[in-house]
Image (cartoon, helix red, strand yellow):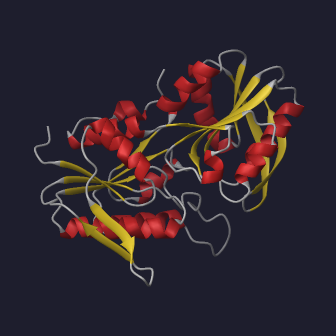
């Protein structure tokens, strides 16, 4: 059992999630001023004593992404200089995660750059959820706990969809996740063969697996412009599926995403609150939100108490 105090602070990216985590842990959210000076520079003042404390900073990669990343870095620096004993960056959605490799000449690996920045400022540990690529954990020289959204999404699927299900992976990389869900529901498995024709633009080429007469659930780690979701929905319905839903961990929903979802034949989009919904998305009747706060609070409590959290990584039965 840890003998030093637990404190949770939040930047401006997702204060609602931070408040829910604190409510679950039955502790107050730490006092901190996080704003900007008139020229746009980030201004941070920690409003309480953190000397010797076990501090968790909740900050997701919500737009404006660069401002929120800088807030995280400055907050961690302030906490380190205030003699916090340990600082854990709780990053529900890890921004720049799609830039995790060199897929063409003369491009950066920005996911690694962000990892270097977060580590170098004095962070001791990372807590995140459904990284776009698991190997991003290796970009850090500090412990990384990558939670899965399955303990949140699987119960929702079981409660709302219980007959003739097929779990659809939108690409080959998502097959292990989709297979794990399909085995535990149980449900059939299908894969979308797609070709990316441009940034944020993909073309569905084929569907591998049987979807005719079934309720299809597209499973993905994020939805950005929703182009893949809409094209996949069309292709699945053309193959004879009864209806199509989607379950996505991170609701980026940028640009025309919400308008596309509203106009599409997608019945519903279930997301977690790792990112706050834009006003337009919050008013979209097709979008349903389930909270990740309890899962993060369980992980924070276990880390603070030096207990194992391996059970939280497992896709629950």
Q: Is residue 59 left or right of residue 228?
A: left
Res. 178 in view:
yes
Q: Is residue 106 left or right of residue 155?
A: right
Front-most of residues 162 and 286: 286
Q: Position of residue 196 (x, y in %)?
A: 77, 55
Tally of marks = 0
Q: Position of residue 77 (x, y in %)?
A: 28, 69
Q: 129 above or below 48?
A: above
Q: 211 above or below 31?
A: above
Front-most of residues 134 and 292: 292
Residue at image x 56%, y 60%? 100
Res. 223 in view:
no
Which of the 4 image quarters holds residue 147? top left
Residue at image x 39%, y 59%? 140
Residue at image x 23%, y 50%? 7
Q: Position of residue 193 (x, y in %)?
A: 78, 42
Which of the 4 image quarters holds residue 156? top right
């Amino acid at each position: 059992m840890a003998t030093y105090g637990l404190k949770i602070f939040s930047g401006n990216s997702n204060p609602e999630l931070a408040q829910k985590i604190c409510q679950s842990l039955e502790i107050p959210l730490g006092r901190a001023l996080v704003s900007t000076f008139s020229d746009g520079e980030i201004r941070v003042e920690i409003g309480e004593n953190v000397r010797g404390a076990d501090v968790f900073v909740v900050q997701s990669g919500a737009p404006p992404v660069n401002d929120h990343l800088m807030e995280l870095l400055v907050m961690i620096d302030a906490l380190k200089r205030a003699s916090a004993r340990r600082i854990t960056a709780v990053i529900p959605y890890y921004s720049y995660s799609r830039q995790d490799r060199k897929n063409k000449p003369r491009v950066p690996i920005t996911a690694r750059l962000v990892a270097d920045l977060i580590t170098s400022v004095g962070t001791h540990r990372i807590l995140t959820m459904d990284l776009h690529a698991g190997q991003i954990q290796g970009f850090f020289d500090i412990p990384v706990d990558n939670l899965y959204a399955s303990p949140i999404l699987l119960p929702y699927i079981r409660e709302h969809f219980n007959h003739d299900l097929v779990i659809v992976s939108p690409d080959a990389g998502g097959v292990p996740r989709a297979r794990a869900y399909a085995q535990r529901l149980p449900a059939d498995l299908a894969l979308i063969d797609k070709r990316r024709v441009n940034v944020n633009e993909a073309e569905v080429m084929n569907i591998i697996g049987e979807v005719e007469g079934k309720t299809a659930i597209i499973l993905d780690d994020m939805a950005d412009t929703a182009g893949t979701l809409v094209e996949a929905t069309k292709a699945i319905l053309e193959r004879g599926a009864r209806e199509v839903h989607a379950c996505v961990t991170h609701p980026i929903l940028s640009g025309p995403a919400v308008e596309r979802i509203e106009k599409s034949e997608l019945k519903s989009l279930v997301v977690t609150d790792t990112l706050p919904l834009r006003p337009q998305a919050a008013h979209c009747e097709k979008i349903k939100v389930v909270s990740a706060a309890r899962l993060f609070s369980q992980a924070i409590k276990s880390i603070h108490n030096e207990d194992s959290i391996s059970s939280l990584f497992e896709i629950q039965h």
